[in-house]
Amino acid sequence: MRSLSRWLLAAAVFLLVLAPAAGAANPPEGTWAWAAPYTSAETNQGFQLLARGPAGSVYVVGDTTNWYWVVSRVDTATGAEVWSQRTQLPTMDLKPAAIASDRQRNLVVAGRCTAATQDFYTVKYDPSGTVLWKRPWSGPANLDDYVMSVAIGKAGDVYVAGRIGKPAGYDDAVLLKYDAGGHLKWKYVISTAGFDVFKEVVCDAYGNAYLIGQRGGDMDAGQMVTLKVDRDGHRLWLRSIAGLGVLYDGDHIRLKGANVYVTGELYKGDMWPIAAKYSTAGKRAWAVAASHSLSSIDDMAVDPLGRIVMVGSSYGSLYGGGPLVYSAYLWAWSADGKGVDASTSFSFDNGSGQWYPGRLNRVVVDSTGTMYCAGGWDTNGAGTEANAVLARVPPPETPGWNGVDKVWRYDGPASGVDEFHGLLRVSDTEIFAAGMRHTVSGYRGIAERPTLP
């Protein structure tokens, strides 16, 4: 923690936000591989989640205003629906929070079911859409419980992470493990006097689980925690970032080779992004923060050189006044954690000479280090009209690098906000985006595939 404290006190790294230069033009637009986007037949639905399906297909999952979730398998070559089904309970509302697919391309969806209180609800489907098992689970206090993430181990074990309510004080962090057949094997809990939560979980080839979240949080303080739990539910190590009398929070975690990469934020008047790198044995290589005010950190990826790529948004007035809109940012920490190799804002000319910003929700990186970001582009400066957008950012070492160099844009058939919330890379030539579009009869889920080289 001492190295991070010194870095913060010295304020050694500042992010460069690339504003459009005078006379600048929008990046060239790409085309979509599918002649028409896949659009769910379910009304009032948005797709938020994507996962790999059997060869030649992907899974898309979303929820509806009627409080059930819809699972669809989509053909990757044509965008045609292979099958689609709704999952609903007679007396409860359902909302998916996370999905993952295993080596046999079975799909696990984890979310919440709500009656008097909110509980965990986990469902496993086979590639044909048949439900293999479904498991509701409630914390011991029978209060509101929230799923945040799900991961599947090599043996098909399912790990569900989140937080559970308790009668007095803040929530506790919890990790559940089910075997491939849906039998609950154990639960691991962190309980302090403050707020505890596991935001995301990933697994290695040995069945160990790695988690990121917050421990002991309250209005003035809290720790960003990273930990490793073995396949039997025993904690192997826990590392925290804390201090300076501020609140820390961990959001995202990625496992790459023998390294664990995490991102989060600290609240020091405004929210600042932070990142850290550990070995799988728990030794911290570095931890850094950037003095740049943000409203959210939405996703992260790790590129082939070991850089942490993050996307986030700030929320403020456009042109110094008027409506509040999101401004989106992307930046890549250097592999040694000593600085920022690249950063860029996300804004485009709406045709009137005004540059309106957008919001980036997801990021993936291909084998060349090229970054793809999905989100939305505000087209009227008020946040009430937006196009769904996929933006490409070349590796920072590209000669003449200047941020976004190509976009794919989708404008739905009716006015309103169209936006991508999910992004999946299957290969360097197969990337998929999912979200929602507005129509005259409400909003519907969409999944699209851009044409790539």
Image (cartoon, rainbow, N blue to C red):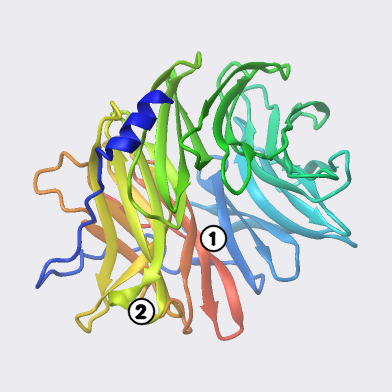
Residue 136, quarter of picture: top right
Q: Assign a secondary structure to mark 1.
A: loop
| Residue 447 in view of the camera | no
Q: Residue 421 appears at what percent x and percent y? A: 50, 58
The residue that appears at 23% across and 44% down in the rendered structure is 342
The residue that appears at 32% across and 37% down in the rendered structure is 9
Q: Assign a secondary structure to mark 2.
A: loop
Which is more toward the observer, 190 or 348? 190
Checking the image for residue 437, the label placed there is: none
Which is more toward the observer, 356 or 14? 14
Type of residue at label 2? Answer: Gly
Checking the image for residue 381, the label placed there is: 2
Q: Quick check: 407 left or right of 233?
A: left
The residue that appears at 88% across and 38% down in the rendered structure is 140
Q: Residue 435 appears at what percent x and percent y? A: 52, 63
Q: Residue 66 appears at what percent x and percent y? A: 75, 70
Which is more toward the observer, 124 or 342? 342
